[in-house]
Image (cartoon, rainbow, N blue to C red):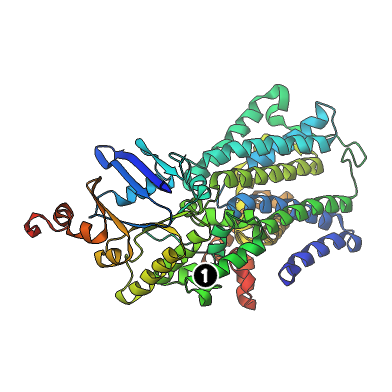
Amino acid sequence: MSLLSVSGITKSFGGVTANKGISIEVGEGELVGIIGPNGAGKSTLFECISGFYTPDAGEVKLDGKRITGLAPDVVCRAGIARTFQKLRPFQGMTVLENVMVGALTRTKDVKHAREVAREWLSRVGLDEKVDTFARTLSTGQRKRLELARALATEPRVLLLDEVTGGVDQRTIPGLVQLVRDLHGRGVTLLVIEHNMRVITAVAQRIVALYLGEVIADGAPQEVARDRRVVEAYLGQAYVQ
Amino acid sequence: MKRYLPAIAYFVVAGLAPLVVKDAFFLDALVLILIWGAAAAAWNIAGGYAGQVSLGHSAFFGLGAYAAALAVTRWGLSPWTGILIGAGIAAFTGMVIGFLSNRLKGPYFVIATIALSQVLLIAASRLKGLTSGSEGIPVPFRPGFWTLGIADKSVWVWIVLVLAILVYLVQVYLERSRRGFQLAAVREDEDAARSLGVPALHLKVAAIAVSAAFTAVCGALWAQYIGFVDPAYVFSVDISIKFALASMIGGVGTALGPFLGAALVTTLETTLRAQFGGVGAQFIGTYLILYGIALIVIVRYAPRGLVGWIGERWGRREAKPA
């Protein structure tokens, strides 16, 4: 049985239907990529899963339990953590305190949360930044901070929105390696990614969205060659 | 421990002062400094730590003042019972306002709080049967601790000092505890906090309710100390601004800041009243101009308040905004 099961999610904003009956299954320990051009409905889907939007139809199940329509904090405590495409560190708090907020969802003990936060920060390679304010971090470091913060909530499924978006080329390999490590550790991941090279390299399976619908779901190489996917990304002219 | 030394010094000096100084004018100022300090600190729980800026906290102050006054004059209860009733009503009202904060953000929340205090002002002025309207209620002086009929101002200093320390400790709790960290996260970015499992709405509602309850206790003790309650003062925007201003001058989101700010603001006001009382009564209002100037200077030169400013001078890390 899949750990995260999304079925028939539909979400409209006025006349625009951002998600039309999207269904995705993610198994325990799987790393599934979500691709699609701008406006395909990737982020809307994440908002629906994480509880920030309530879908008009369809349901989200975590380990068989329905979590559709629950508030974001309840969804997180149920075991789904997320990062934001537009990074949102707690600017006025230190890097350590940022991650402690995540850890405090699972422990009541501030001291223990501090230790847990330190551990996660060293895993994502931010040991030296522990006591600096989050606002002083570079974009790449902020991505790492968001990861650590989300991981500290001990999610069963982690939703990553654009791991490599907005960071410079040299920073990408490190972040990709980090995602690989997490996967290696058994974390179940659902990853939105624009960079095709990155996502085909790390994902076990890729789901392609276009105009709110799933147009392909399969092994990375298959999906990358799929006629409809190429068409959606590059236009009809490139389809052989 | 070291970071709490300034606060310990502040409260110890306040507590010992009545043993050394017997001057009634000074003791009166000290009682007011501590009451306004506690009220500013109570405001800081919502406005500073939870980031829910209110300019209507006089609503809670007034509810406390009236609850205590009515308990004594109409219902024949001990003022202490009145204080508890006031705190309970204020906490409930704070919860309602707290739930509104989910929909009303920033300036809209501020306006809602002002509206609340003004609605109560009108209600207290019109419900003549209960509150005697704008004539106000004189609180009778019945000697004794349980009736709060205390002539010795030193005792008043100690009573309000206990309250001040209590509110201070609540703030320290908010700087060190799990709930405090979570609340700080909500203040920084509510959605991000919620995505990390923080029950943002509950925390905000709780913070505003606690803030309201302590503000009501301040109002109740103030009413018993002054011996008179009238709607135009206890529900005024003036004192709402005073709470916020004292916090901002001292340092929003710092535990000691509101007490320092209140000391400054109250001293200023008391001095002006003493200077211009009688002959130059029309100049008493100058304190409003000075409030304005003080606020401009603070925002321009010490945006993190006195605590932040002093911290920077001494190069200490604890001066960071909590």
Asked if residue B248 shows in the view, the reply is yes
Q: Which residue is drawn at 15% across and 57% down?
A: A230
Q: Which residue is drawn at 76% across and 32% down?
A: B137
Q: What residue sits right under mark 1 in the picture?
A: A121
x and y percentages locating residue A223 in the rendered image: 22, 57
Q: Nearer the viewer, residue B169 or A203?
A: A203
- In this view, the residue farthest toward the front is A1
x and y percentages locating residue A28 in the rendered image: 43, 53
x and y percentages locating residue A225 in the rendered image: 17, 59
- In this view, the residue farthest toward the right is B144
Q: Which residue is drawn at 30% across and 57% down?
A: A205
User: Disc 1 is attached to a residue of which chain?
Assistant: A
x and y percentages locating residue B41 in the rendered image: 68, 54
Q: Nearer the viewer, residue B139 or A216?
A: A216
Rendered-image quadrant of the C terminus of chain B: bottom right
Q: How many labels does the image show?
A: 1
User: Would you say A58 lies left or right of B117 here?
Assistant: left
Q: Nearer the viewer, residue B201 or B52?
A: B201
Q: Which of A55 and B40 is in front in this view?
A: A55
Amino acid of disc 1? Leu
Rendered-image quadrant of the N terminus of chain B: bottom right
Q: Quadrant of residue A30?
A: bottom left
Asked if residue B287 shows in the view, the reply is no
User: Would you say B109 lies left or right of A224 here?
Assistant: right
- In this view, the residue farthest toward the top is B129
Query: Local crowd at mark 1 within 10 Å, few (<14), some, or many (≥20)?
Result: many
For mark 1, give the secondary structure.
helix
User: Would you say B273 lies left or right of B102 here?
Assistant: right
User: Would you say A240 lies left or right of A116 here?
Assistant: left
